[in-house]
Image: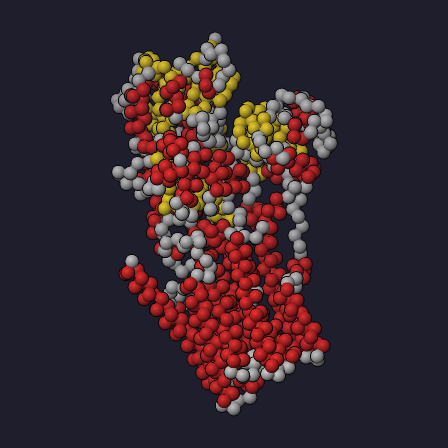
Amino acid sequence: MIDSDSQRQWHCLPLTEATARLNSSEDGLSTTEAARRLASYGTNALPVPQLPGFWRLFLRQFVSPLIYVLLAATVVSLGVGELIDAIFIGLVLLLNALIGALQEYHAQRSAEALRNLLVSQTRVLRDGEIVELATGQLVPGDLVLLSSGDRVPADLRLLEARGLEVDESFLTGESLPVNKDSQAICEPDTPVAERCNQCFAGSLVTAGRARGLVVGTGLNTEMGRLSLSLESADLVRPPLFQRIERFSKRLTVALLITVALLAMIELARGTPVLVIFMTAVALAVSAIPEGLPMALTIVLSVSMRRMVKRHVIVRKLVAVESLGSCTVIAADKTGTLTLNQLVAREVAFFDGRGFHVTGGGTEPIGDCLPLEGEVQPGDAERLARLSRVAALCNEAELRQLEGGQWHGSGDAVDQALLVLAHKNHQAPGQLLDRYPLQAQIHYEPALGFAATLHRDDGRQLVCVKGALEKLLPMCSHMAGADGDIPLDRKLALARMQELAGRGARVLAMAEGSWHNRHSFAADNLENLCLLGLVAMFDPLRDSAPDAIAQCRVAGINVCMLTGDHPHTALSIARELDLAGKGETAVTGMQLADAEARGGQAVDALTGGTRVYARVSPEQKLTIVRSLQRQGEFVAVTGDGVNDAPALKAAHVGVAMGRRGTDVAKESADLLLTDDNFASVVSGVEEGRIAYQNIRKTVFFLVSTGAAEIVLFLLASAFALPLPLTPVQLLWLNLVTNSLQSIGLALEPGEGDEMQKPPRSPRESLFNPSMVRRVVVSGVVMGGLSFFCFSWLLRQGWEIETARNSVLLLMVLFENVQVFNSRSESRSIFRQPLFNNPVLLLGTLAAQAIHILAMYSPLMQSVLGVSPVSLAHWGALLSVALLQLATMQLLLLFSKRRDHENSMKE
């Protein structure tokens, strides 16, 4: 029986006792025991805050100043005996609340689905083997493996720690990373911030590696006890929403002033106070785009779901629209532009000899064939020594499953080296038995190499792998065909450059004996023998060249960032058509020199560069800031803990969902579920579509509201009766208009999104083009409606009959205007009619509902409408189609003017 861990002071216990108390072992838990504990302890997760139910969301829709006005209008109508008006307004309010509640309810379910897609993974020892599990499956007694960039998945008692530093600022307030010591035993009253032998759920590993025993999960963690919740982060309104809300408020103030003036004019003319009040309410409802926030939510939610289908998960809603604005994409090479499936293809020695390696993937099936002639005894010995280093200085795992298939885990470079070792009959397990591991220097990007120390009978064997430039200072001699010879640096560099020029990722191998009295550390490695080079190739993703070509057409510059040698980087860049024959790569050393001279020197270096080689993750931030200073809107991809500053500083941060660290994922706005550059480009396209749909919806709602204001202003100016009753206005804007605006939010792309240059990030939503179209639309629709109303009155029609025609005309105007809103630059006759069935059905439904109301006795009395003849309906449709003709003429005029301006330039 396991004691409850909720009160256990694990920091006071020795390692053996802590492991014994949880009935764990060096091999971790068995799968059966883990399943039993999971049923007993529950999942390793904090309770998700209970989401409000549908009815609570429904009631929330009535919390709005605009709704308060409508409720007041309902009460006034009841007070003066206008029962029909009161019932109608109440029904409209219920319908509006129902639509809003359904949308919020759907958005919540989408958020839940998104949360399920963002399940974190952690490495755990189960049944003696390293497996990757969802963090929610962890139980007390599990053995967890941590490395730099990981988020700690549960409360742990450290069993082993190597250079481990952890950021616990979220828990303790300590801004600096904390050094951890697994061997320490703390006093019982040691505060959480000083428990150096523990790691706590939610903290971030900033450096080093560790193995820890899970001692607390879910609510039994320190995070659980503090009831921390990440949900509150989503409460911040996106900038796009804030801009729209500011616009709506300004528009509201302007329209309220207009409505107040109309009310005073009508009051002076003797119009009944109740009619004035109800008309003012209805006009305010019609002019204020109250459906805009809901439409925006629909647009962005639809884009989120579309992006998920294209392997992009949106963590921040506004990133949907922001990605479409990027002018530069700074992309990782490995795994993003390539498959991240490194295969060792060649082993090269420095006398020109070497081996070609056959086979591929993670299956160690293949041979090492000599590049020239027969295998020489000296070559076989060199290959064996190099393969031994490849197997011993390695942190990956390669094992054969029951079905005969091979499974690899760990770094792609290490996996490729294990496959190479197996092909040369150097099994890592047997080698480690022969050469037990004594110490290790783990690979870090800033270090550029890794090293291990092994016991070898009467001596200590050093194995080192890494970039040739890093290993050369450590070496004094090199392996030759007849034995070790003095090191020839120029020869080694020339051989490496020849391999890199063919697009290979080149790794050097070295070994030696350890005689240093100092500790086994990076600065103390010397007198090693350089064994040879391993040339590894990472194939390009099939979709990468086409994706980069799309970016070029779309006016987006793509920069490739890699830690590889400049020759390798340029070879890959030329395959991708990112660099020509005469172009060079900017190296991390050049960037560092430019930084020392100041920002202008950096900008001069990055201004015309598309290939960066041997750059550290930290230098990504330098590149991003430089591009931003030059006016670029930058999207950057990253996967490591050191990429987090660049991801945060970029306008849009894109993290790798598969191989990315938790730190990178949480710093990013978007996640790629397939780590594929083509998915970034797909996201750009969806972002541009989202922005277009936002503009389309805004234009439709604002232009139809402007038409009604123009109609009433003209009627008041010419001393005519009110052209529409308050109830008719409410019907027009809250029923027929809403049905069609939803369809615009679901518009597919026009097909040319990636053939246009990026829009300026500083461009206002209401740019001159939008303002011009709104003004022309409002004047035409409002003016024609007024002309129709006044002409009918002059022909002797009764006011109610004239209003019936004007109301039908306005509905027809909406039907026409929604199709005018489908594109800002393309004629309505070039838009496929059936590629948005929701819009088509919504338009037909709006017209059908109104016609049904004209024939319904109940709605006839509520709206004051009546049936019209088919000829009359056709005549009104002809008038409405004048709006279509007007917008087509405006489009032609705008295109001609833009062409003339471009000719002048």
The quadrant in which the C terminus is found is bottom left
The extreme bottom residue here reads 796
Q: Is 101 on the left or on the right of 414, as rendered? A: right
Q: Is residue 35 visible?
A: no
Q: Position of residue 589 (x, y in %)?
A: 37, 30
The residue that appears at 50% across and 21% down in the rendered structure is: 440
Query: Is residue 878 in view from this perspective?
Result: yes
Q: Residue at x 48, y 69 (%)?
A: 703
Q: Is residue 621 above or below residue 395?
A: below
In which quadrant of the rendered view does residue 461 lie?
Answer: top left
Residue 113 in the image: above or below residue 487? below
Q: Residue furthest top?
A: 458
Q: On the rendered image, what quadrant is the N terminus found in? A: top right
Q: Quick check: 659 left or right of 556?
A: right
The relative height of residue 414 versus residue 620 in the rendered view (above or below) is: above
Q: How many marks?
A: 0
The one of 216 and 790 positioned closer to us in this rendering: 790
Rendering quarter of residue 586 = top left
Residue at point 38%, 65% (across, down): 826
Q: Is residue 227 above or below residue 887?
A: above
Where residue 145 sits: x, y (%)? 56, 30
Q: Quadrant of residue 751?
A: bottom left
Colour option used: secondary structure
Q: Position of residue 8 (x, y in %)?
A: 72, 29
